Image (tube, rainbow, N blue to C red):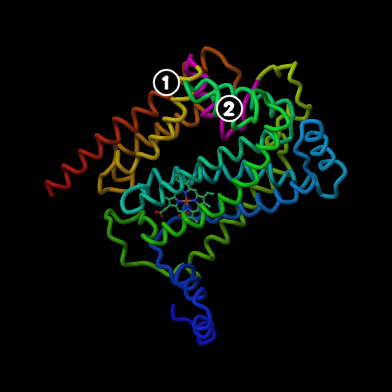
Amino acid sequence: MPPDSFEKKNMQRLSAFRKIHEHFVNFPMPAVNWLWCLGACLITALGLMGLSGLFLAINYQPDIQHAFSSVMTLERRVPAGWLIRSLHMGGATMLFAALYLHIGRGLWYGSYKAPREFVWLSGLLLMALFMVTAFAGYILPWGQMSFWGATVATHAIGSIPLIGKSLLSLLLGGPELGDVALRRFFVLHFALGFIAVALVALHILCLHGVGSTNPTAESRKPDLTTRPFHPFYTIKDAIAVCVFLMVYTGLIFFLPQLIEKQANLLPANPFKTPPAISPEWYLAPFFAMLRAVPSQLGGLIIALSSIIVLFALPWLDRSPRHNARFRPLVSSGWILFFASFLTLTIAGLEPPSAFWILLSRVALVAWFSIFLILLPYASWRDCQQEVKK
Ligand code: HEM
């Protein structure tokens, strides 16, 4: 869209205006569906998390004597403290829900393929960063679940041969979870939030270098029927963000029991293990993987490998076809993958039992078979067909 004279003058005054115009007004977008609005929802969630986090940090005391009571004081005595904390905790759930859907969209539409490898890899770095940030944040209130969840995870890190013990003492500042560790988790949680913002900027920079995937065309070439980002996609994103905020509000006002576990309303007690230790739902699939393997180290390797295969995805599936709708084998693979992810999430939230461990193992076999067998095979077959054409 041609800029009006006022905009034109502003662009001459400051080159940043030119960049904004290029990237957020005139940016050519192919015909994408509602799933492409999840990026805007993620940015909204991240902004709200950062803002509420800053207010939480004003009241929080990072030492094991006062951490729990500082959080309870915030909840009960500080004006709107409960709202700020609910925004932050509910924000984590909303952010991860949008994040997993955003990744699912990328898998289904083949957004990880050339030339978007950097978009995919920077996105995965963001996911890993959010997992660590969420884990560190969950320890901060120093409730029963914070303490015991951290104990399980740190034991798993300590089981790494050769470097495990040193890594653990670097993280905890000593052999045990205590004051020094809590302060380190606080700094880590706070600092990672800012690094995430920088990484999001990099992620969008990578995307704007190559443009969005075209979900309708069956080719790598950009669609000729692109539209400018503004007003077409700014309006669409704004509507999606409103719906996202309505669900977010519904969650924190009407379903608060879903965002905080009851066991975490009790202060940490190193002498009393809670009847069942389970993580937040968004880390549950990886917790289920840790439990599905009898050895602690084996579980850690499997959980890490399940993420590493995602990093290797652009090279495991090199087919020129993007949309899974036009690839029957791949679409069944992704449906199986989504089912495995769901199974592992439920398994990670349930108390350990032979049934859930068996199901987790089946889901794990499916997870790795899809990435290491089905996709390379489907990709090879597609390439053969393209050559024949
Ligand atoms: C808070 C974290 C994240 C934010 C704020 C974010 C933001 C965005 C935005 C604004 C877009 C453009 C709009 C859209 O396509 O939805 C986008 C696209 C994309 N994101 Fe993310 N993202 C995040 C995490 C991730 C993760 C974890 C992955 C994958 C592992 C990922 C992979 C992609 C890909 C492949 C695209 C390009 C889609 C296309 O080709 O059209 N992102 N992201």
| Residue at which label 2 appears | 168
Give left or right: position of 144 versus 105. Answer: right
Residue 96 sits above or below residue 13 on the image:
above
Viewer-side residue, 369 vs 332: 369
The residue drawn where x is 44% and y is 55% is 33
Packing grade of label 2 (10 A; few <14, some 14-19, many >=20) is: many
- Residue 295: horizontal and vertical position, in percent? 48, 15
Mark toward the start of the polypeptide (1 vs 2): 2
Q: Are marks 1 and 2 in contact (CB under 8 Å)?
A: no
Give left or right: position of 122 versus 66. Answer: left
Say which mark, if any, is on residue 262.
none
**Looking at this rendering, what residue extends furthest in the left direction?**
388
**Looking at this rendering, what residue extends furthest in the right direction?**
77
Asked if residue 294 lies in the magenta stretch, the reply is yes
Asked if residue 361 lies in the magenta stretch, the reply is no
The residue drawn where x is 82% and y is 49% is 80
Say what secondary structure mark 1 lies in: helix
Viewer-side residue, 277 vs 375: 277
**Start and end of the magenta stretch?**
277-295
Residue 305 sits above or below residue 22 on the image:
above
- Residue 100: horizontal and vertical position, in percent? 50, 41
The residue drawn where x is 37% and y is 28% is 368
Q: Is the magenta region chiefly helix, strand or loop? A: helix
The residue drawn where x is 46% and y is 47% is 123
Q: Amino acid at mark 1?
A: Val
| Residue at which label 1 appears | 362
Q: Amino acid at mark 2?
A: Leu
Give left or right: position of 102 versus 225. Answer: right
Which of label 1 and label 2 is nearer to you? Answer: 2
